[in-house]
Image (tube, helix red, strand yellow):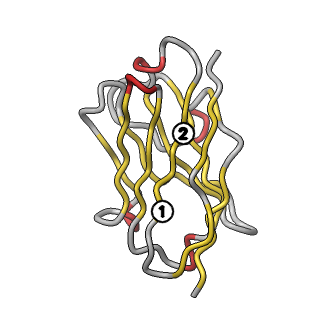
């Protein structure tokens, strides 16, 4: 069982930056592929970024490439999402997720077994 707690959300102006954190419980954090997802008002939850269990591979939604960076620190049982040049349409609740995956990093929601409660990111225009 893994429990995930996100933090770092808030209100930021368009073009600004935020760094989201997700801290996991449990001793096996380093074995999990970690992902970040978001759900904008009135929309489905969507994939944003993922990082492999060893941190050597990352994958991003096309629209965030070059602006967002996912990273992890296994010594702190944490995964991060650095978000730069934020846009108003990226206002959403952001969730971290954990799962076991091999091969390509998963973008599907059902590939992840554990989810945090989410943190609100609001980007004003």
- Picture mark count: 2
Instruction: Using the image as rendered, state which of residue 47 and residue 22 is in the foreground.
Output: 22
In the picture, the quarter occupied by the N terminus is top right
The residue depicted at 57 percent of the width and 77 percent of the height is 89
Determine the CA span between mark 1 and mark 2. Answer: 13 Å
The residue depicted at 53 percent of the width and 80 percent of the height is 13
Residue 87: percent from the left, percent from the top?
Answer: 49, 77
Residue 23 vertical placement versus 68 (above, below): above
Circle 1 is placed at which residue position? Answer: 18
In the picture, the quarter occupied by the C terminus is bottom right
Residue 66: percent from the left, percent from the top?
Answer: 28, 65
* Mark 2 Cα shell of 10 Å, populated few (<14), some (14-19), many (≥20): many
Residue 34 vertical placement versus 95 (above, below): above
* Mark 1 Cα shell of 10 Å, populated few (<14), some (14-19), many (≥20): some
Residue 119 vertical placement versus 121 (above, below): above
Circle 2 is placed at which residue position? Answer: 22
Residue farthest bottom in this picture: 125
Indicate left or right for 112 with 58 as reference. right
Residue farthest left in this picture: 56
Residue 6: percent from the left, percent from the top?
Answer: 61, 43
Residue 114: percent from the left, percent from the top?
Answer: 63, 29
Residue farthest top in this picture: 27
Quadrant hosting residue 67:
bottom left
The residue depicted at 55 percent of the width and 74 percent of the height is 12
Quadrant hosting residue 38:
bottom right
Residue 31 vertical placement versus 8 (above, below): above
Q: Secondary structure at mark 2?
A: strand
Quadrant hosting residue 53:
top left
Q: Secondary structure at mark 1?
A: strand
The residue depicted at 38 percent of the width and 25 percent of the height is 74
């Amino acid at each position: 069982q893994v429990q995930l707690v996100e933090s770092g959300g808030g209100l930021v102006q368009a073009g600004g930056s935020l760094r989201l954190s997700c801290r996991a419980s449990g001793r096996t954090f380093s074995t999990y592929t970690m992902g970040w997802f978001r759900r904008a008002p009135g929309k489905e939850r969507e994939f944003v970024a993922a990082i492999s269990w060893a941190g050597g591979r990352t994958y991003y939604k096309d629209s965030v490439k070059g602006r967002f960076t996912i990273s992890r620190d296994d010594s702190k049982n944490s995964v991060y999402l650095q978000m730069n040049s934020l846009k108003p349409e990226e206002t959403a609740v952001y969730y971290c997720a954990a799962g076991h995956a091999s091969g390509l990093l998963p973008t599907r929601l059902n590939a992840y077994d554990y989810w945090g409660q989410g943190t609100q990111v609001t980007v004003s225009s």
